[in-house]
Each structure stands twice: as C-alpha cells, then as structure tokens.
Amino acid sequence: MSYEAPVERPSGRILTETLGSGDGAVSVGGESALPFYLFDGEMPNRPVIAMEVFDAEPQGWPAAVTDALGDVLADPAAWARACAETHGADLVCVQLASTDPNGADTSPEDAAACVRSVVDAVNVPVIVYGSGNADKDAEVLKKVAEVVSDTPLAIGPAVEDNYKAVTAAALGYGHTVIAETPIDVNMAKQLNILITQMGLPAERILIDPSTGSIGYGIEYGYTVMERLRLAALGQNDAMTQMPMIVNLGKEAWRTKEARATQDEEPAWGDGAKRGVLWEACTAITMALAGADVLVMRHPEAVRLVRTAIDGLLEQ
C-alpha cells in the first residue's frame, strides 16, 4: 500500500500587498498555507529583504558592519543606492534614529528631507521607521507622509499611543502603516481593528509583531508570529491576515554575541563571521515564522538569507 501524505487546506489566506509603485513595486503576502508549506498551499510571493539606511552616520557599530558597507554611511542617499544596486536589496528601510528627543532630536523637516533624498535615489520601495518615541514619531511621520506624497511609503511604527496620527497621515497621503505591538497576538489584532476602523484598508497595513534576535527571546516571538498565521489561515481571521514585517537588523547587532571581537571573547571565534551568522540565523528563523519583509543590515547576511530562501522554495 502506498503512503499518501495528508494535506491540509486552510480556509484563510494572507492578504497580498503592493509596496512602492511602478517598475520597482514589490508584492508581499498572498500565502494560503504556513510559511514554505508548499505541499499544503501557495506561497506566491517570496519573503523580501529590506536593507537599513540611517538618517545620520551610526556611531559605535562593529567594524564587521562598517567595513562591509563602505564609505556611504554619512550619506543616506548614497547608502540607499548601494543597498539597492550593489547589495540587491528588494526594498530600503530608512531608520530615522536621529529624531529621538533623547538623542539628536532632529526636526521633522530634516527627517522628511532625508527620506525625500532616499526616495529620489532608488527605484525600489521605501520603508520608514521613526525613532520609537511615540509622540515624536507622530510628528515626524506626518511630515514625511506629506513631503513624499507622490510615492507610496510604508511608515511606522504605529503604536497604541500614536496610531491615530500615523494612520491619518497614511490616509491623507496614500501610504501603508506599519502596526507595531509588543509580542502579543491579541494586541496585534486589536491595533489592526482600530486602524481599519479609521478607514485605512487592511491591504495597507503591515504587522510588526516585535521580536528579539536568536538567543534573546526569539522563541517567544516565533510563537506569536506562528499563532498570528494560524489564526489568519485556520480561523480565517481578517484582522490577522496582513503580511508581517520584522525589523531584525538592529536586534541582531545589538547583542553581545554579534558585537564582541575575537580578542574580547577568544572562545567564540571570528567576530565578523559570528555577527553575520547571528543576523542571518535570526532572519531565516523569522522567515520560517511567517515574516514577509525582513529588515536587515549586513550585505553578507542578506546574501546568506536570500540563498536559504531560494533553497526553501525549491521543494
């Protein structure tokens, strides 16, 4: 008797979203099965990789990162071009870290000018993350949305304390909202409900479930993402069917294991290779959990993850 593997056909499907416009547009989502379960359903759009670009030259980064990125770190537009043209990024993610009131406190106008320069420099979709300060992000993202109203962006994070302002900006100027919640299925679903109640279509929301890197709570983040996918597919829950984005580069490279040199930790081996593998393993884990957009930092980690995704899709 021959064996026939059981096949599950979920009743739900992840929404398909288009980021960017024109020839450079990228489609994400659309899955009708769990990540890479090609035997159960479809995965029409592969996970895509967005590479980070910071609005001000980063300080204190490991040499493994700065050497790989070269001399573009003081120029966001040049950095973005290198990500898209040299390193093959599917998207560019502008991190407006300098707008943090506890740091340089850059003005919304300066932040918008930075994003404008990046958008003009590349032909790939652009994602914009604020500093993580809810009040300042509301001001910054509103100005960014206004100044770059001719090009659809994905802007965030929209959180409980500022989602009304961020969503209103997205509604007014035609952008997508990144809805971020702290590693909780019910909170993610509730924020999506609140945003859609303001009139933003579900097809213009990305879920950022928040997560750490490997070694720092990634198993909990994985579980939350998996539960979001199970609700979206198995329960046909419309408020969990948005594609997911994971802002993982900063999480991977803030860990001691990624940053420590071989001189500091001789038993850990080559620090440069270790950091790349730390980010790549984090990204691959997130793709397996259901991430549709991976925000990454190191070009070699990007190459490794792209190769891994290629292999997973060749089933």
Image (cartoon, rainbow, N blue to C red):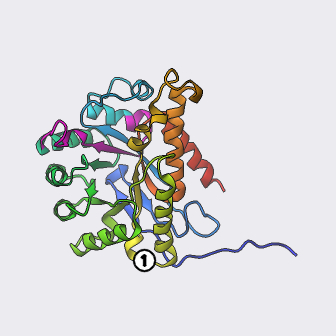
Q: Quadrant of the N terminus?
A: bottom right
Q: Residue at x 65, y 66 (%)?
A: 39
Q: Please tell me how crowded label 1 is: few (under 14), some (14-19), or many (20+) other residues with Cα within 10 Å.
A: some
Q: Position of residue 255 (x, y in %)?
A: 44, 38
The stretch in magenta equals 83-107
Q: Residue at x 31, y 69 (%)?
A: 192
In this image, 93 relative to 198: left or right? right
In percent of width and height, residue 235 lies at 48, 79
Q: Residue at x 14, y 49 (%)?
A: 147
Q: Is residue 220 left or right of residue 139?
A: right
Residue 57 lies in the magenta stretch: no
Q: How many marks?
A: 1
Going by the numbered disc 1, the residue's amino acid type is Asp
Task: Please tell me which residue is depicted at 64% across the width and 53% down the height of the picture.
Answer: 314
Q: Position of residue 242 (x, y in %)?
A: 39, 66
Instruction: Give above or below for 63 relative to 112.
Output: above
Outermost right residue:
1
Q: Nearer the viewer, residue 241 or 231?
A: 231
Point out the image quarter for the C terminus: bottom right
Q: Which residue is mark 1?
A: 237
**Label 1 SS:** loop
Q: Position of residue 196 (x, y in %)?
A: 27, 72
In the image, is residue 63 above or below residue 103? above
Tell me, yes or no, whether the highlighted magenta stretch contains residue 88.
Answer: yes
